[in-house]
Image: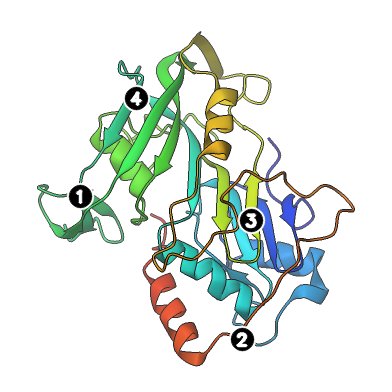
Amino acid sequence: MEPGSVENLSIVYRSGDFLVVNKHWDLRIDSKTWQETLTLQKQLRHRFPELADPDTCYGFRFCHQLDFSTSGALCVALNKAAAGSAYRCFKERRVTKAYLALVRGHIQDSQVTISYAIGRNSTEGRAHTMCIEGTQGCENPKPSLTELVVLEHGLYAGDPVSKVLLKPLTGRTHQLRVHCSALGHPVVGDLTYGQAAGREDQPFRMMLHAFYLRIPTRAECVEACTPDPFLPALDACWSPHVLVQPLDQLFQALRAAPDPDPMDGGPGACSAPTLLPGPGQPPPPCTKSPETEAQRASCLQWLSEWTLEPDN
């Protein structure tokens, strides 16, 4: 796959209030450092200069975060009211997210629920990393839950790996990477939570990709699916041997699953599956109420819990 550039920004969903981009691997969302030659924020400014908001620090409101090394679906709100509506969906745990990954080893169970509590690692030399409850230096562990479904078994550069679908039911920092590592099957190419030094130099990227995203705001169902990057045609090192569960079936199940009820009992916009807007189609009707300063402050406080730590 070609490296990221300012021109190759891929848009998988667009309406009057939201964009969903297919973020490139090894790309920061934004950065205040002059050394950062390419960020997602710069790609957006290049592609959509008319959509940049001068009242924001980076010009765009990112509704959630993806690690530097993770690729895939990332939602951008185009105004304050839209950002507030997406924030409420995340706060109420009504957002559906699913990731694809290649992990080390052949996972024997076809489905696994991973429930290790995750906290910050205070061990010297492990700053800005996370760990599971019970390990040395683990501070303030919080309940964390991930569902894992095995898709395929195969080899990557001759080593046994499994292709999996991961569905995080909580939103802890580095949750999927920590949970896979704790399970004994770290993500291929994960230099922080992967195998011993030297074993993760082979892959050209970390094999974790945000595959599916659904945010059921009051006015609009933001739903997007990104292409599967873990195919032999795209990476000759990946050789699948055994099909365990077809991805297409799981994707249809994701789309058909009802959204969790809002905490206040109001209706959601994605209670029934909806088709993605096609080229030339108008965005769904939207009725917005202005976001208050208190709502904005609450949103910023919540987003700070999702802020990425510097990569190691």
User: Does residue 67 sit above or below 150 in this rendering?
Assistant: below
**Quadrant for the C terminus in the image:** bottom left
Q: Position of residue 222 (x, y in %)?
A: 64, 56
Question: What secondary structure is found at the residue carrying circle 3?
Answer: strand
The mark lying in front, picked from 4 and 2, is 2
Q: Position of residue 40 (x, y in %)?
A: 65, 61
Distance of label 1 from label 4 (alpha carbons): 19 Å
Residue at which label 2 appears: 290
Distance of label 3 from label 2 (alpha carbons): 20 Å
Check if mark 1's residue and mark 2's residue have beta carbons within 8 Å. Answer: no
Mark toward the start of the polypeptide (3 vs 2): 3
Mark toward the start of the polypeptide (3 vs 1): 1
Res. 103 in view: yes
Amino acid type assigned to the residue bearing label 4 in the image: Gln
Distance of label 1 from label 2 (alpha carbons): 37 Å
Residue at which label 1 appears: 117
Residue at which label 3 appears: 222
Residue at which label 4 appears: 111
**Quadrant for the N terminus in the image:** top right
Distance of label 4 from label 2 (alpha carbons): 43 Å
Mark toward the start of the polypeptide (1 vs 2): 1
Q: In terms of image quadrants, where is residue 113?
A: top left
Q: Image check: 21 left or right of 176?
A: right
